[in-house]
Amino acid sequence: MLLAEEVGLDLVEISPNAVPPVVKILDLGKLKYANQKKAAEARKNQKVIEIKEIKMRPNIDSHDYETKMKAVRRFFEEGDKVKLTLRFRGREMAHMELGMQLLNKVREEVATIAKVEAEPKLEGRQMMMVLAPR
């Protein structure tokens, strides 16, 4: 403690569980600043994965389907997950198999670039499936 006070620095405990405890004489402010900079650099380099949602209807037209699939592929290239939502309205509720066929068609098309993270499931009037890039 006396040595640290003489030099005008702080006595920092590095390993308190060791016998005897390990301490260093250094500037605590500089240490905190360096750790803060290191954490900021680590945060800057990491990619935040977003979940993008694509909404469809079971009787979607072929051109609309292709447009949606283009967006899905673009999302995978950016490294994002995709949540496909099929909304059923009125009499469409009687033909759930059409929605399942559509989701299976999407699954087969993106099989090379994506994997199924959440299998298709029905929640009320919506059927959802989550895909993640490979």
Image (cartoon, rainbow, N blue to C red):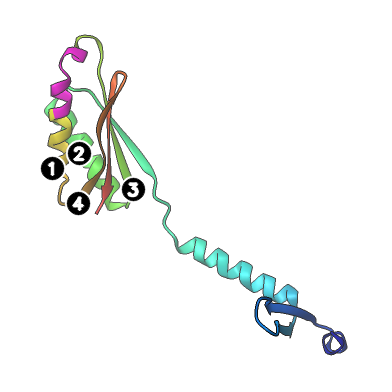
Location of mark 1 (residue):
109
Identify residue type, mark 3. Answer: Asp
1 and 2 marks in contact (CB < 8 Å): yes
In percent of width and height, residue 81 lies at 32, 45
Identify residue type, mark 4. Answer: Ile
Q: Within the image, what quadrant is residue 25 found in?
A: bottom right
First-in-chain label (3 vs 1): 3
First-in-chain label (2 vs 4): 2
Foreground tag (3 vs 2)? 3
Q: Which residues are magenta?
A: 92-100
Location of mark 4 (residue):
113
In percent of width and height, residue 18 lies at 65, 81
SS for dot 3: loop
SS for dot 2: helix
First-in-chain label (1 vs 2): 2
Q: Is residue 81 left or right of residue 110?
A: right
Q: Is residue 61 above or below residue 47?
A: above
Q: Quadrant of the C terminus?
A: bottom left
| Disc 4 crowd, CA 10 A, few/some/many (<14, 14-19, 20+) | few
Foreground tag (1 vs 2)? 1
Location of mark 2 (residue):
69
Cα–Cα gap, marks 3 and 1: 17 Å
Location of mark 3 (residue):
80
Q: Quadrant of the N terminus?
A: bottom right
| Disc 1 crowd, CA 10 A, few/some/many (<14, 14-19, 20+) | few
First-in-chain label (4 vs 3): 3
